[in-house]
Amino acid sequence: MMAVSNPLDPTEALDTEGRRLLYDLVSTPSVSGEEADAAAVLVEFFEDHGREAYTDEVGNVRAPGDDSLLLTSHVDTVPGDIPVEIADGDEELGADGLVLWGRGSVDATGSLAAMAVAAVETGVSFVGVTGEETDSRGARHLVETRGAPEAVINGEPSGWDAVTLGYRGLISGTYVATSESGHTSRPDPNAVEHAMHWWRRVEDAFDYYDYGAVFEQVTTKPVDIEGGLSDDGLSMEATMDVQFRVPPSLDPEDVRERADAELEAGTVHWNEPIPPVMGNPRDPVATAIRGGIRRAGGDPRLLRKTGTADVNIFAGAWDVPMATYGPGDSSLDHAPDERLPLAEFDCAVEVLVDAGRRLRGRTDD
């Protein structure tokens, strides 16, 4: 937990309804699986502006509107107790003005609040999804229960002057092995060794390929391992949870088959893969966002992210133009010093309103 020196009175900084919504949402704990209170804040915001809003079976906040554009971001955050405070920015923070500290301010409550404000301003559809930080249950439920909109902007931090076009895919699984119990002096490998040997072979298999930039590589990562004697003491057991990030040049199924080929003992129970995605910088959504950035005084940048997001699921289900956008420095995702300059949030709202109006075909100029 990090403390902010000389925090300011929030009432002095919350001079727009967008900032007030942002502050209320960041102040409302919304760890994955516990999004209901934050969802209620969003529903009330839309109802206060005369918009229909409700939570669906998995807790998604749905505010139907003009389906020429769907604005969507995730309600949930990762755990972490960061006191919600507003402080003066400085050179170290890379921003002038006021900065909001708190879990989720960057990933991705800043995007969520900006999109809610833009949806009210433009009349387009909005969904705040649940579970993005765990199993993407909200996004999966969404694509199963509604038709495709005409376009999608997914909310994740890109920085207010950048648009993200690409994310790597994800395939995850659990390796399981068992072996007979026996004295540790025996030379035969036990289940724990089988797990370790398999993972070394997997890492070597993918290190063999030189894909260049990290975005083009397969990243192999063990995320949890357990092993030892079974409860009855008659066997050794080992389980290992693993993840593979998959570039657009490969199919997750190819990665799974390559990992399975290294098995000499044990099995892997694979989860449903999430395919990689790479958008077109000239499609209508990316063009609208880049235009909004320029009109707000920025010089647009194009990004590719090495992680995975709900946009991968949307792209796998809906063949429509889409891109990812939102305020904040993504290097602060899940960090103990997560914070968002309020001026950057304001700029992102301006860009999203501009893009929403243009994708709806109505502008003021």
Image (cartoon, helix red, strand yellow):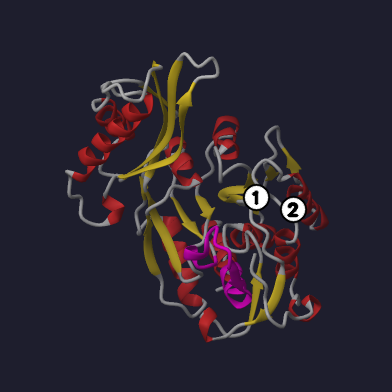
Contact? badges 2 and 1 (CB < 8 Å): yes
**Mark 2 residue type:** Leu
Residue 215 spot, x, y in % from top left: 31, 53
- Residue 273: tell me if it is visible: no
Find out whether residue 337 is within the magenta segment: yes
> Quick check: 79 left or right of 9?
left
> Quick check: 119 left or right of 16?
left
Q: Which residues are magenta?
A: 327-349
**Mark 1 residue type:** Val
Residue ID for mark 2: 42
Q: Quadrant of the C terminus?
A: bottom right
Question: Residue 246 falls in which quadrant of the image?
Answer: top left
For label 1, the SS is: loop
Q: Nearer the viewer, mark 2 or mark 1?
A: 1
Q: What is the number of the mark on residue 75?
A: 1
Question: Residue 49 falls in which quadrant of the image?
Answer: bottom right
- Residue 31: tell me if it is visible: yes
The CA distance from mark 2 to mark 1 is 9 Å
